[in-house]
């Protein structure tokens, strides 16, 4: 570990220890897993992990989150988030992520009060400050801590440190809620979210590591890493994908030749 990265990690641990007790918004992704593991090192038992359960989050992600929390020995609670019952969220405006995080953090703060936990933190990193992240605005407004931002940790820093800590998420592809596959201004429905989850499971089942299935009416636009595009266009694999996605309910299936890139749906903003 180079000195700069070592200093950042030590700073993070110092920040976490200063909290005394902490509730972590834990999705099971690269960032929140690293935060939870480091918080466990710093705080031991004075720690609770909360994972949102809703149609927005693939079942496989929740299962992986549960397994790691159990392995770590951290108290882990699933909370049923209710954003799908709120018309301002399902309208899918550019404030979608802001509203989702605001409702979730409200629930987390309530749980923290009930458990006499003073601080709630999320897994934002320095790189998140450079993208369109309205959820980060909600976190600031509600005094949700961002200890990895305060410690100056980037996504690459977190992956490097995760690898050194033998966390199997160190090279996990970026993951976001399923609503990010639906263009702004298009109503979010449970049916669409389920179709997206099933379609992405088909692609992941072919050995692809990064995948997004974007929904445009009844059409599926598949994004994978550029290096995987040629493979999924092979006649046999292509026929398998089309057949399975048609059964799921898509009328048309397309592959995006640009490949997967995080935040693609934000271009329209």
Image (spheres, helix red, strand yellow):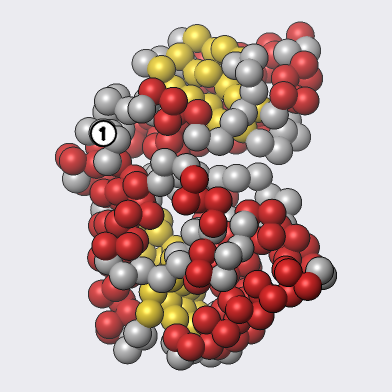
Residue at 36 percent of width and 69 percent of height = 144
* Quarter occupied by residue 40: bottom right
* Local SS, label 1: loop
> Which of the pair 123/83 is nearer the observer?
123
- Residue 205 visible, this orientation: no
Task: Estimate the x, y position of residue 109 in percent, counting from the top left.
Answer: 29, 73
Farthest residue in the front direction? 4
Task: Estimate the x, y position of residue 202 in percent, counting from the top left.
Answer: 62, 30
* 4 vs 45: above or below: above
Residue at 65 percent of width and 27 percent of height = 224
Please tell me how crowded label 1 is: few (under 14), some (14-19), or many (20+) other residues with Cα within 10 Å: some
* Left or right relative to 168: residue 190: left
Task: Estimate the x, y position of residue 221 in percent, counting from the top left.
Answer: 53, 18
Work out which quarter of the rendered image holds the N terminus and state it: bottom right
Residue at 34 percent of width and 61 percent of height = 139
Residue assigned mark 1:
93
* 257 vs 125: above or below: above
* Quarter occupied by residue 73: bottom right
* Left or right relative to 131: residue 140: left
Work out which quarter of the rendered image holds the C terminus and state it: top left
Residue at 58 percent of width and 60 percent of height = 31
> Which of the pair 143/55 is nearer the observer?
143
């Amino acid at each position: 570990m180079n000195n700069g990265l070592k200093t950042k990690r030590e700073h993070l641990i110092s920040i976490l220890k200063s909290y005394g007790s902490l509730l972590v918004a834990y999705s099971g992704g690269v960032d929140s897993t690293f935060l939870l593991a480091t918080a466990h090192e710093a705080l031991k038992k004075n720690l609770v992990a909360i994972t949102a359960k809703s149609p927005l989050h693939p079942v496989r992600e929740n299962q992986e989150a549960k397994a790691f929390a159990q392995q770590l020995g951290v108290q882990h609670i699933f909370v049923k988030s209710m954003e799908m019952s709120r018309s301002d969220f399902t309208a899918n405006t550019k404030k979608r992520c802001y509203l989702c995080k605001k409702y979730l953090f409200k629930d987390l703060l309530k749980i923290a009060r009930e458990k006499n936990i003073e601080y709630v933190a999320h897994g934002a990193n320095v790189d998140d400050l450079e993208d369109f992240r309205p959820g980060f605005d909600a976190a600031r407004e509600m005094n949700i801590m961002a200890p990895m931002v305060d410690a100056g940790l980037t996504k690459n820093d977190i992956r490097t440190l995760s690898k050194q800590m033998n966390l199997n998420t160190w090279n996990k592809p970026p993951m976001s809620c399923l609503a990010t596959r639906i263009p702004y201004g298009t109503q979010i429905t449970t049916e669409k979210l389920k179709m997206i989850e099933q379609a992405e499971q088909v692609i992941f089942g072919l050995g692809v590591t990064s995948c997004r299935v974007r929904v445009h009416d009844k059409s599926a636009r598949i994004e994978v890493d550029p290096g995987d595009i040629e493979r999924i266009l092979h006649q046999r694999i292509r026929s398998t994908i089309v057949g399975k996605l048609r059964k799921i309910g898509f009328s048309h299936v397309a592959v995006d030749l640009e490949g997967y890139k995080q935040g693609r749906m934000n271009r329209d903003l």
